[in-house]
Image: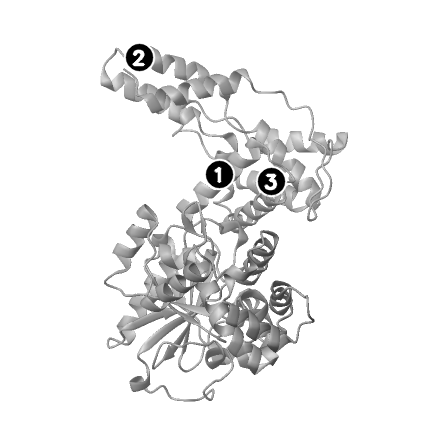
Amino acid sequence: MISNPIARAVRGSARCWRHRAVFNGLPVSSSVSGWRWRSAPTRRASSAMEELLARVAVPLPSYETRDKSPPPPESTSLEFMNFYRGLEKEDKAGFLSRLSQDCGVDHRAVSDLAAKLLDTQRRDQATILQAEDRLRYSLTPRYKQLFSHVSRVPGGVKFLVDLRADLLEILATKASDSPHIRDLNSTLKSLLSEWFSVGLLRLERITWGSPCEILQKISQYEAVHPIRNWTDLKRRVGPYRRCFAFTHGAMPGEPLVVLHVALTEDIADNIQSIVREFATLDAEEDINKINSAIFYSISSTQAGLQGVELGNYLIKRVVRELQSEFPHMAQFSSLSPIPGFSSWLQGLLSQYRKEGRGSDLLSEQEWAEVEQAVGSNPGTPAADSLRKLVATGEWTRSEKLSLALEPVLMRLCAWYLYGEKRRGFALNPVANFHLQNGATMWRINWRADTSPRGVANSCGIMVNYRYFLNETSRNSALYLQSKAVAASEQVLGLVSQFQKNSKL
């Protein structure tokens, strides 16, 4: 008998064909983040799209000739690329909608082959396997074949990466929530995951001697701790620093993901010592002062590769590279920002005040210290004063306030990192990334990033995720399978304090 998953797929494909609507135009929507969903393209534009797609997104060759059909001329792929690049932003959304709906799977053929597969279940295994292979081939969307051809022309892979970035923006801004658009995005993501598998990537160390174009892109793409000028960049690729990037042969001169590393004696607890306090540019590295590798910035450079695993493999490759260069090195750790902590805290304070539980977050003595430090007017809720302090960052200019808030913000931050979840995994995206890699939530650091950005995003707090190399595989498996977070005594102690004060 046919297996349940196959049977469900067969029935689903038949339903899909029976309920497929005929495309009459694009739904009307207002402008969202630059995308404008038009009611329908103009007649001339619509005709041009139809003619182009008829030429470039041709039907799949028959099953019997699939390996014998010659590929289309390169000019066809170039025509598609040039046409798309020439469209205005809002017209690209309409074009991708038409591509996804009109150039997908031939649902009638799928339904016919699905019925034939059901009929073969009492026959020999070879016949069943061939029927399954025919059905599998028929489930290939026409646009997948088009993307494969585009990837083979110069600049084609980069074009498709950028096209997926457009798709992601359309979906994120809800300019379209069409299942066809989602399927188009899923298909393209699957292709990119194959083309950018770790075995096809090249690890490059970026130095001051690297091509100027690469150095400029490294500077432009730095998303965590912005590079201020060329001198700053020179220091970040100079003595006691390493910069690595993954590149791909199909996108020459284009770093895909970039990792900055500081070589230090001990595990750093603040970013100022890394990006602000530099050794001289011509310093000679003293190997005796290099015991730790601190991953202080990792940036993906291509929006279209979102969801394609690159960063975790880059860290693992860099660890091996550093172990080769410094065999004695035993400490590997990140020094990570905590994006979203301040906004989460604002929401928590609002929630507790609304529920009349403001006193649960801080002890009576702590509330009294906050009120005294801010000099709040009688009758002003302390929670409102605390919210204002977090929103403005004014507390950083007062040593008295800083001392009063340190224990409060540290335990709140510990809970945010350790206890706040989305579908069972860490809510904070940076925490989730490192925990998936098998790191341990090791140390939360007060006043670790005193820049305006650091104060605004995370009240100046940063966290070390420690990579104990003999534990990463086990930690990763436990986190992914059981959602268990590996954490140090310091972190667990702060979490316990939060639970006690918040009566959780």
Residue at image x 50%, y 49%? 157
Kindly report which numbered mark, 1 or 2, lies closer to the viewer in this rendering: 1
Q: Secondary structure at mark 2?
A: loop
Which residue is at 26% across, 73% downward?
A: 330
Q: Position of residue 148 (x, y in %)?
A: 47, 39
Compare residues 376 and 179 and report the one nearer the observer: 376
Q: Which residue is mark 1?
A: 186
Label 3, secondary structure: give it. helix
Labels 1 & 2 near each other (Cβ < 8 A): no
Which quadrant of the structure image shows residue 454?
bottom right
Residue designated by label 2 = 120
- Nearer to us of marks 3 and 1 is 1
Amino acid type at mark 3: Phe
Is residue 20 in sight in this rendering? yes
Q: Position of residue 219 (x, y in %)?
A: 55, 70
Q: Earlier in the sequence, mark 3 or mark 1?
A: 3
